[in-house]
Amino acid sequence: MTKDTKRGCALVSALKSDVIVDLGKEYAELGIDSLIESNVLESIPFVSTTVGLYKAASSVRDQLFTEKVIRFLTHFSDLSDAERINMTERLNEDDKFAGKAGARLIEIIERMESENKPEVAAEFLKAFAREEIEFNVLRRLLVALERIPSFDIGELAAFTAITPDQPVEMDEAFLDGLVNAGLGKNNGAWKSVIVPTELCMTFVNAGKL
């Protein structure tokens, strides 16, 4: 099996650690800014390094990445240690991640343009951890999450409630974005209507939207 990168191994170690539970509590009490300025994160591998970059203010990109990583990790605090460990092992076993789950997750987090998207990604991974979705569905959800503009995510729940029999006027750019992300499709009727795909339904349910 291919070995993970140093940063990837550190992220996986953080995911497996029971410190995640305390991190989730601190995040809920302090909020993202106060949590970063506190000493709580110093004992967590990978996170402590990214926080160091944040405090050094080396770049806006480093600051945004730090926030995204913390938002991502804190969302796993309601999973048991066994569930988190099993999740990372199953990710590493799949050929698409090929033993480099940590590095792949870091790549995914880095590509997300919003600090809120990693929270949704974490919900997808939790659904995978609980065996509510298969790995192939997880991959498609993460691709869709990367493609859809973050400001459109909040509209997805309303979109999934639409039926071809009761069409609702929606912004054309919004619908085009959903089709591009694989979350919307033409219903194939003579008077075409963009309707939610099965992936869109799963996106809303697994993402807790």
Image (cartoon, rainbow, N blue to C red):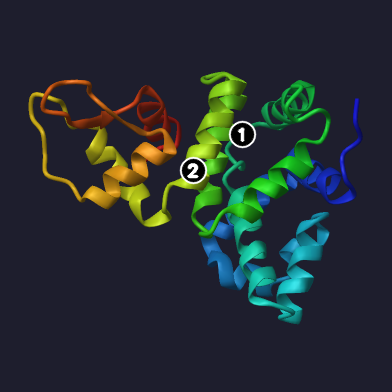
According to the picture, the residue beneath numbered tag 2 turns out to be: 145
Whether residues under marks 1 and 2 lie with C-beta atoms below 8 angstroms apart, the answer is no
x and y, in percent, of residue 167 in the image: 10, 33
Residue 87 in which image quadrant: top right
Asked if residue 173 shows in the view, the reply is yes
Looking at the image, which residue sits at the far front?
A: 190
Residue at figure coordinates x 67%, y 75% from the top left: 37
Image coordinates of residue 118 in percent, x first then y, are 56, 49
Asked if 22 appears above or below 85 in the picture, the reply is below
> Which quadrant is home to the C terminus?
top left
Task: Give residue 79's mark.
Answer: 1
User: Is any atom of residue 130 visible in this view?
Assistant: no
- Residue 67 lies, in percent from the top left, at 61, 63
Looking at the image, residue 45 sits to the left or right of residue 182; the answer is right
Q: Residue at x 59, y 72 (%)?
A: 34
Please name whichever residue, 175 or 99, is drawn nearer the observer in this view of the structure. Answer: 175
